[in-house]
Image (cartoon, coloured by chain):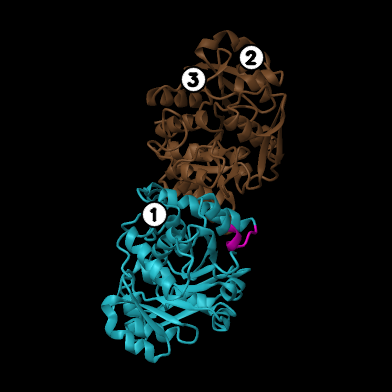
Chain colours: A cyan, B brown
Amino acid sequence: MSDGADAIVVLCGGVGAARFLDGLVRVVDPASVTAIVNVADDAEFHGLHVSPDIDTVLYTLAGLVDAERGWGIRGDTFRGLAALERYRRDTWFLLGDEDLATHIRRTELLRSGMPLSAVTDELRRALGIGARIVPATDARQSTRVRTPDGWLAFQEYFVRRRAADIVLEVRIDGGGMAAVGVLEAVESAAVVIVAPSNPIVSIGPILEVEGFREALRRRARPVVAVTPIVRGAAIKGPAAEMLRGLGHDVSAVGVARLYADFLDVMVLDERDADLAALVAKTGIRPVLAQTIMRDADAKEGLARAVLAAASWRGAR
Amino acid sequence: MSDGADAIVVLCGGVGAARFLDGLVRVVDPASVTAIVNVADDAEFHGLHVSPDIDTVLYTLAGLVDAERGWGIRGDTFRGLAALERYRRDTWFLLGDEDLATHIRRTELLRSGMPLSAVTDELRRALGIGARIVPATDARQSTRVRTPDGWLAFQEYFVRRRAADIVLEVRIDGGGMAAVGVLEAVESAAVVIVAPSNPIVSIGPILEVEGFREALRRRARPVVAVTPIVRGAAIKGPAAEMLRGLGHDVSAVGVARLYADFLDVMVLDERDADLAALVAKTGIRPVLAQTIMRDADAKEGLARAVLAAASWRGAR
């Protein structure tokens, strides 16, 4: 884990976080960045361990990602998945042929007894990624969602049923201890950034890891969050519907309140300038920025704005 | 397992056996056929259990096989394998994207605790195959080959080094009991056919399964073998070089001698008519046939000839 004065820790879900990281590593030394990634969406498909958020971060930072979709590998094919249908397997969770190689290798290493954090480190190094990528926990953690049809495993809700159900309750099962070095990194980093990810099912499980919230609260230096909600809607995914279903304000203010015990700065989108005063009332300093990451320039611009909001001075 | 008067058991290696079976199931009810298949070539690649001979039989009988090569799936691609190279994996054992689905599903079922015989039965049913396909044993059995460079695992010798080494010795490790029903099927079948497969590394390991040779010897009804050697050469694979290296006659006579304790009839190729007298001397009845399976007609013709040699009267 990168330590010292310039270390940057980013709490990450999938697509939004990966795009943010992609901008960040263009403006700071990638070796100074540690991405702590949600694993409560992890699931086993066909006996293979799939870590959707880690994969999205891996593929994005390796330059392999399908930028349109935000996940999976650009130009990947689905012949293996079609062949699994011959064996009457459910194939609603899309796994491309190149993507499968990641799950095959991860599963092989996990079965050899390696913890997920060491496996992930091996994968990111093999892909030539300079930033550290660390699962929040090596323990099995899994999100379940209660809908009017009952409890659903996260991928069942999110992928199979296309996040179309009303969310009445979210529960994070399992979890436990943070992966080795995670809490120390959180405490010692110059900046901790909460990526523009779903606060309930992406950042939420990371915060539930033993000692994680406390480590954030103990920090003397800033914790900065980037809102995943702009003008009452999520850029990607079901964050807005989830916040609404769970009775939270569907805005940067609602998100700031969920982080209020450890957050110093909330980066709002410029189009939400009217919310700045409400954020300030919660004791969190509002900062306005262009948060929509349409292209590389926008990603870099957001990274610089977030670092400036944290008074971090090392950007290139 | 198919029992009764019309049951046919075929001892099988890979390509030659699969082609023979393909003809056989065209001239008899596939449900009367039980293929007992070598698993001593099985190996784990990338944490996945690969059963090369079973796969060749599965793909051939399912009409999926790449007929040119004799193995793998027609038109398959290799994107997953290329992606495994990103993770610095050895990829000399070619695994296609569709093919990987078989290994993924097999491995998933094996890890759930199912024996290989039950797994194989599930796969062949899913592929709509009427013949039973049974691994010789559910125990791990593995062939090693001693060369001037030392001992090699079978796939190392066969695929990675392209069977180019001189074979000084062959050892079958592991093994143990036959899969459930195998010995009973061997004893009770109307005909047992030894497919035109490598007698050392394909049929040899089957014969080493506990009680297998004895079950063959106990049979009252005929055991018929089809020579894998024609005019001193193997149709496919390293059988000729292996026989030579191990000091056996590189001919149907040499093969017949390896099976002498249980074999009743040896089907020679018409072009080896001069060997008939030598085969007869070993106490085995020689029968001449066209053994080269160039096309569907030739496969069917060979199946009919073999059944006729066994005085089996049920062919359609």
Res B268 → quadrant: top right
What residue type is disc 1 on?
Val
Q: Residues within 10 Å of mark 1 (few under 14, many from 20)?
A: many
Q: Which mark is residue B280?
A: 2
Q: Which residues are magenta?
A: A113-119
Q: Is residue A218 magenta?
A: no
Q: Residue at x 66, y 47 (%)?
A: B139
> Whole-Å distance between the Cαs marked 1 and 2?
67 Å
Q: Badge 3: few (under 14), some or many (20 or more) residues near its Cα, within 10 Å?
A: many
Could you say where residue A316 lies in the image, as x and y percent from the top left? 44, 60
The chain ID associated with circle 3 is B
Task: Locate the N terminus of chain A and report the quarter of the image it occupies.
Answer: bottom right
Q: Is residue B60 left or right of residue B36?
A: left
Instruction: Name the residue at 57% across, 28% down.
Output: B197
Badge number at residue B291:
3
**Residue B143 at x, y percent in the picture:** 67, 36
Q: CA distance from mark 3 to mark 2?
A: 19 Å
Residue A184 versus residue A5: which sits nearer the camera? Answer: A5
Q: Residue furthest top?
A: B274
